[in-house]
Amino acid sequence: MAQISTTIASPGVIRKTGEFNVFTFGERDSRPSERIAALQQAINDAGSSAPVTDDIERDIWSKFVLFSAVSGITAAGRCTIGDIVSTPELGVLFRQVVSETAAIGRALGVSLRKDIETRTCAAASALPKNMRASTAIDLENGRPLEIEWISGAAARLAKKAGVNATINEALYTLLLPHKRGNHRRLIPHKRPWCRRPRTAAESPILPCFCDAVHGSFHRRVGPISTNFGLLT
């Protein structure tokens, strides 16, 4: 499970955009092994962090509970963590997504902590106020989005588990038009066609299109579980 903020700078180039970098991984059954210990040691020696886990599935879902809310809301709302914290309505929506995704995990048999919702909201409040998910950054820059593996995945897993995921479904739907990206980059400020009218007869209202989105990959390449699938 990677806890690191990155974005696609250009094809084949991933740029780190945050300060934290934690990599949690384990065997599929979460049992210790020599290869897991060796990889953890190598990552720790390199200056990153690779903590030991006794339940990799729980850890992956704990991240998913947080990321489904951060990604979906900062992208669909074109906002930051600071906006979520300072805007009561966004805060309520954020907590609803957290609770919804946690309920999906529990319905699928994941041993999430009883206080995962409280812990997740506290963790989000401690994040940098200007932070946005990479989904939001890629939306702004017109790149493909990873929504199939975040809000879209939550919606699909909810159907599989037989639970409600109305908000995740709504976030997925809002971002769906931008799934493949768009060559028209979203420019949030100083649009040349949005100017103050010279006379009362002039209309200041002209179309401003917010086109978008983000690309990512989740893959399976072996028997070590991570949030990207499996590693060898």
Image (tube, rainbow, N blue to C red):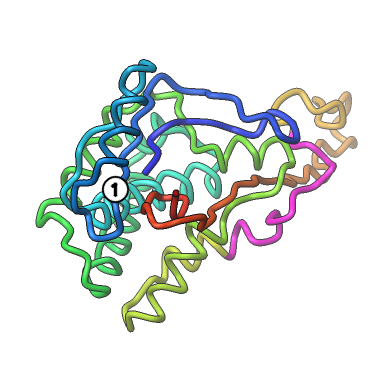
Q: Nearer the viewer, residue 59 or 219?
A: 219
Vertical arrangement, residue 225 with respect to residue 135, above or below: below
Q: Magenta stretch?
A: 173-186
Give the farthest residue toward the left.
114
Q: Position of residue 82 (x, y in %)?
A: 39, 29
- Total marks placed: 1
Q: Position of residue 185 (x, y in %)?
A: 78, 37
Image quadrant containing the N terminus: top left
Q: Which kind of residue does numbered mark 1 sit on?
A: Gly
Q: Is residue 71 left or right of residue 21?
A: right
The structure residue drawn at horizontal position 19% and vertical position 44%, both measured from the top left corner, is: 53
Q: Is residue 27 left or right of residue 221?
A: left
**177 magenta-colored:** yes
Mark 1, Cα crowd under 10 Å, few <14 / some 14-19 / many 20+, is many
**40 magenta-colored:** no
Q: Position of residue 140 (x, y in %)?
A: 67, 37
Name the residue carrying label 1: 26
Q: Is residue 66 left or right of residue 103?
A: right
The structure residue drawn at horizontal position 47% and vertical position 46%, both measured from the top left corner, is: 71
Q: Nearer the viewer, residue 30 or 6?
A: 30
- Mark 1 residue element: strand
